[in-house]
């Protein structure tokens, strides 16, 4: 029988679902497959920790939506002025209410639909021991995947925990590149350790299909909603030259114009830890980097047809495209 491990980021993405009703509708689906689901103490800690940060991030976004009220003698003479003032004040009031409710949600965890969904997965949670932590540290020093950023060994602890306790065929649901890009290595290691098979998929619905079943329509709608929202967020980041395009470009310049994704991730972590601290603990950084590389690469199917800045040398290796210069990049954002 398969077991299914769902990466923390998959659940954090559920906060981007359009409606709470979409999350509540998933509860029967998760309960149906609960006997297949496993979790680790490390993952649980990561979810609880990043849950708070994710909600705080949304609160900061809401604060930026509060509109100033332009009060001037000239505007007050216009017929539409009173209606304008009323609409602005009503919108600001709604935003303030949402901010307060979001703050309450952080403290009242039982009212959080995403957290309640996550608790179903926690029914079988593998313990984290000192032995596992020591193995994870050793794995990091050796350089064997999965590889976290250089400041933590969270992914290493998760993998060592799974190796210690899981004795079934395993499906990992993740969009984290450290698992996907090292699939062959991890699959062989898991086989040697357990004698069982390992599969890695990007969506919970794909894991359910590997069990031989069809996922619910509600699950697929929720996952599609998340994909659309993530794309919208990436588009918003790319509108500001101080964000990802310049960060990635600067990192590649520092690394000599060409680098593996692993080296690029590490360099970008250095950059954002110094200059963009609000991104530092965001576990979606790697996915955002990959999306940005694809959108500014003319050979990618996700190319945005704006600027051809990056080139995919081979799997896991990216370079600056010599057809574009740093001056072009800066000029396009002025």
Image (spheres, rainbow, N blue to C red):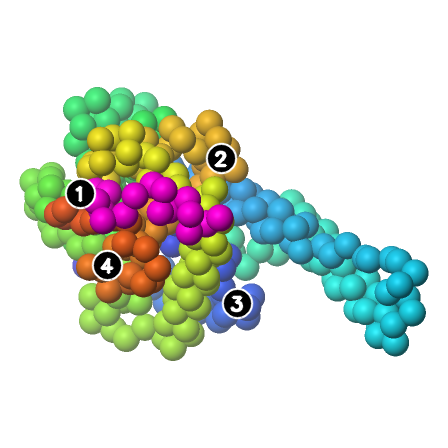
User: Which residue has dot 4 on it?
Assistant: 298
User: Which residue has dot 2 on it?
Assistant: 276
User: Which residue has dot 3 on it?
Assistant: 18
Q: Is residue 317 above or below residue 129?
A: below
Q: Give residue 166's quadrant in the image.
A: top left
Quadrant where the N terminus is found in the figure: bottom left
Of pointers 1 and 3, the one earlier in the residue sequence: 3
> In this rendering, would 160 be left or right of 82?
left
Q: Give residue 13's quadrant in the image.
A: bottom left
SS at circle 1: strand
- Judge by depth and name the residue closer to the eye, 227 or 33: 227
Residue 225 picture location, percent across and down: 44, 68
Q: Which of the two discs, 2 and 3, sits closer to the camera?
A: 2
SS at circle 3: loop
- Judge by depth and name the residue closer to the eye, 250 or 233: 250
Q: CA distance from mark 1 to mark 2?
A: 24 Å
């Amino acid at each position: 029988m398969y077991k299914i491990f769902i990466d923390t980021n998959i659940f954090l993405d559920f906060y981007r679902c359009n409606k709470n009703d979409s999350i509540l509708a998933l509860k029967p689906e998760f309960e149906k497959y609960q006997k297949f689901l496993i979790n680790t103490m490390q993952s649980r800690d990561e979810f609880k920790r990043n849950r708070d940060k994710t909600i705080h991030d949304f609160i900061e976004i809401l604060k930026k939506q509060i509109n100033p009220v332009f009060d001037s003698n000239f505007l007050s003479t216009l017929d539409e002025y009173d209606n304008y003032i009323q609409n602005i004040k009503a919108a600001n009031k709604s935003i303030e209410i949402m901010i307060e409710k979001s703050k309450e949600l952080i403290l009242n965890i039982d009212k959080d639909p995403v957290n309640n969904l996550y608790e179903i997965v926690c029914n079988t949670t593998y313990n984290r021991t000192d032995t596992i932590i020591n193995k994870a540290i050793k794995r990091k020093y050796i350089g064997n995947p999965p590889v976290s950023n250089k400041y933590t060994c969270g992914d290493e602890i998760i993998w060592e925990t799974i190796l210690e306790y899981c004795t079934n065929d395993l499906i990992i649901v993740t969009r984290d590149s450290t698992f996907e890009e090292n699939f062959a290595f991890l699959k062989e290691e898991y086989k040697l350790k357990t004698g069982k098979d390992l599969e890695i998929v990007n969506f919970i619905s794909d894991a359910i299909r590997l069990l031989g079943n069809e996922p619910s329509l509600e699950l697929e709608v929720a996952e599609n909603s998340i994909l659309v929202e993530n794309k919208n967020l990436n588009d918003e980041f790319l509108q500001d030259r101080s964000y990802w395009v310049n960060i990635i470009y600067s990192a590649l310049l520092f690394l000599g114009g060409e680098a593996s994704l692993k080296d690029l991730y590490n360099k970008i972590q250095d950059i954002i830890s110094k200059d963009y601290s609000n991104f530092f603990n965001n576990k979606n950084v790697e996915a955002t980097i990959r999306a940005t590389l694809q959108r500014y690469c003319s050979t990618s199917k996700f190319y945005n047809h704006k600027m051809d800045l990056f080139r995919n040398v081979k799997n896991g290796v990216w370079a600056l495209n010599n057809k574009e210069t740093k001056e072009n990049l800066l000029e396009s954002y002025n």
